[in-house]
Amino acid sequence: MAEILPRFQKLTAGDISEKKPGQLVTTADLESERILTMQLADLLPGSVVVGEEGVAAEPERLGLIDGEGPVWVVDPVDGTQNFADGKPVFATMVALLIKRRAAASWIYVPVTDRMASAEIGSGAFIEGERLHTAEAVALSGMRGRLSGRTAKNLAGKVGSIFNERCAAYEYLAVARGAAHFALFRRLNPWDHAPGELLVREAGGFSQRLDGTPYLASEIDASLLLAPDAASWQALRALILELAP
């Protein structure tokens, strides 16, 4: 997008601020969300847009996700800390929600100019190439995204652990078979609705850690994604045993 890549590795001190302690926002976040909000609302009359920065400024906007009409959720720069640090691990995420469930989603990686997309029931793709999640393997051979105490507790129990500090990249890794699983906690819809659909449409299995389906309106929960239901069950048992 024109508001993101030209600013990469060229941010000035005035381009970066904190919306909350430890949570950065840049002019790229703000300007790209402003433009996407206008474009998406025009694209689908009657829809509303719930963006990360819009909710930061007006928290009550998050309640729009529970409305009856279609809702766009937008993360203009997922991986803002990476972007501000000059690390090329960031992306733009968009999902179209119908009754709190993603019907379509897009993840755009500006650095490589590549778009991943998914539509419910139609598969997941990157630039026309169909995505497939990894084949199921034993826990000891799995590579997955974990963070915090869970990552420490599962170290040595699974094959390897990674954390890109960018949900978009982590979901893409699972959807294209470069990783087997991912566990996320604190489910802001703009961070997870796009990628969760992408993984499911690539053939993966996804549920909240309590065994219920993911809904974009439920933030205080944990989401586990795996190649199939059996792998998901094995991972869930291990996670709950070691890091309840």
Image (spheres, helix red, strand yellow):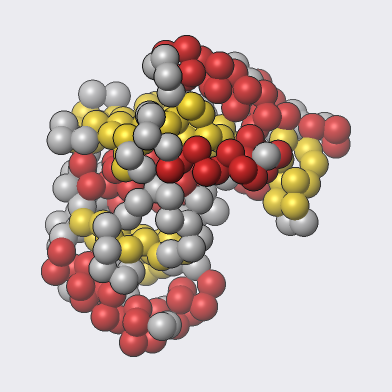
| Among the 4 quarters of the image, the one containing residue 8 | top right
Q: Residue at x 54, y 21 (%)?
A: 36
Question: Relative to 181, is 123 on the left or the right?
Answer: left
> For the point 26% across and 80% down, which residue is it?
237
Q: Is residue 44 above or below residue 64?
A: above
**Vertical placement of residue 118 versus 60, above or below:** above
Image quarter hosting the C terminus:
bottom left
**Residue 138 at least partly seen:** yes
Residue 52 percent coordinates (x, y): 58, 40
In this view, the residue farthest toward the right is: 14
Total marks shown come to 0
Q: 88 and 195: which one is in front?
A: 195
Q: What is the x, y in percent for residue 33?
A: 60, 27
Q: From what the image shows, is residue 19 above or below residue 158? A: above
Residue 83 appears anywhere in the view: no
Q: Vertically, is 36 above or below 76? A: above
Q: Quadrant of the N terminus?
A: top right
- Measuring 70% from the left and 39% from the top, which residue is drawn there? 57
Residue 219, given in percent of the width and then of the height, sits at 48, 57
Q: Nearer the viewer, residue 167 or 110?
A: 167
Where does the image place residue 17, in percent across and percent down from the top left? Answer: 80, 41
Determine the residue located farthest toward the front in the rendered image: 68
Q: Which residue is rendered at x = 33% and y = 39% of the image?
A: 99
Between 59 and 4, the one nearer to me in the picture? 59
Seen in the image, is 180 located left or right of residue 169? Answer: left
Quadrant hosting residue 131 = top left
Left or right relative to 77: residue 115:
left
Q: Going by the image, does 176 lie left or right of 62?
A: left
